Image (tube, grey):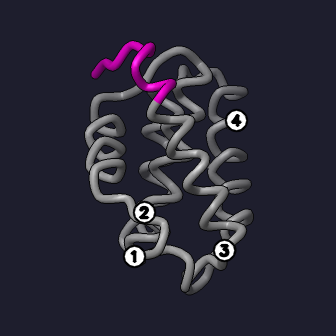
Amino acid sequence: MQEWGYNELIEYVEEVFSNSVNDGLNALQAGGRCLYEFANVIEEGETEKTIFYIFLALLQIDKGILSARIYEEVQNIIKVFDIDNFVGELGVDDAKDLSLRIESLKTKIKSVEVTG
């Protein structure tokens, strides 16, 4: 991760999402704003992309909905996720945290409305 620390990226995604909701956007629109705001981050590498999409999906799910675009990305991430591919870049603790978030997402994604 070139410019972002693990927790820094998570906090910034959460801030943009929360500010968007506070500005009156719904969870789908807030997710769209995050996609726009973090377009360059998503392109930086697989680690940044994985962290971004997993955390954004969790934020939307907490609001009771998940966009189809984010759902598709997350499903692809879940299929190929291997913690060992992230330990070198994130360190053991952050890679474990990411793995736990993905496991949580696997459960939560089954009971949320996917739309758009």
> Closer to the N terminus: mark 3 or mark 4?
4
User: Against 94, is 13 above or below?
Assistant: above
Number of residues whose C-alpha sits closer than 10 Å to that of mark 2, classed few (under 14), some (14–19) or many (20 or more): some
Tell me how far mark 3 sits from mark 2, CA to CA: 18 Å
Between 59 and 25, the one nearer to me in the picture: 59
Query: Where residue 90 appears, x then y in whole percent?
Result: 61, 77
SS category of the residue bearing label 3: helix
SS category of the residue bearing label 4: helix
Q: Which residue is mark 1?
A: 45
Q: Are marks 3 and 1 in contact (CB under 8 Å)?
A: no
Tell me how far mark 2 sits from mark 1, CA to CA: 6 Å
Q: Which residue is mark 2?
A: 49
Closer mark to the observer between disc 3 and disc 2: 3
Q: Are marks 2 and 1 in contact (CB under 8 Å)?
A: yes
> Looking at the picture, which amino acid does disc 1 mark?
Gly
Q: Is residue 113 magenta?
A: yes
Closer mark to the observer between disc 4 and disc 2: 2
Q: Which residues are magenta?
A: 107-116
Q: Which residue is mark 4?
A: 18
Between 95 and 34, the one nearer to me in the picture: 95
Quadrant in the picture for the C terminus: top left
Quadrant housing residue 85:
bottom left
Between 74 and 20, the one nearer to me in the picture: 74
Tell me how far mark 1 sits from mark 4, CA to CA: 24 Å
Query: Where residue 21 appears, x then y in whole percent?
Result: 65, 27
Q: Residue at x 28, y 29 (%)?
A: 68
Q: Is residue 71 left or right of residue 101?
A: left
Quadrant housing residue 4:
bottom right
Number of residues whose C-alpha sits closer than 10 Å to that of mark 3, classed few (under 14), some (14–19) or many (20 or more): some
Q: Which residue is mark 3?
A: 92
Number of residues whose C-alpha sits closer than 10 Å to that of mark 4, classed few (under 14), some (14–19) or many (20 or more): some
Q: Is residue 69 left or right of residue 9?
A: left
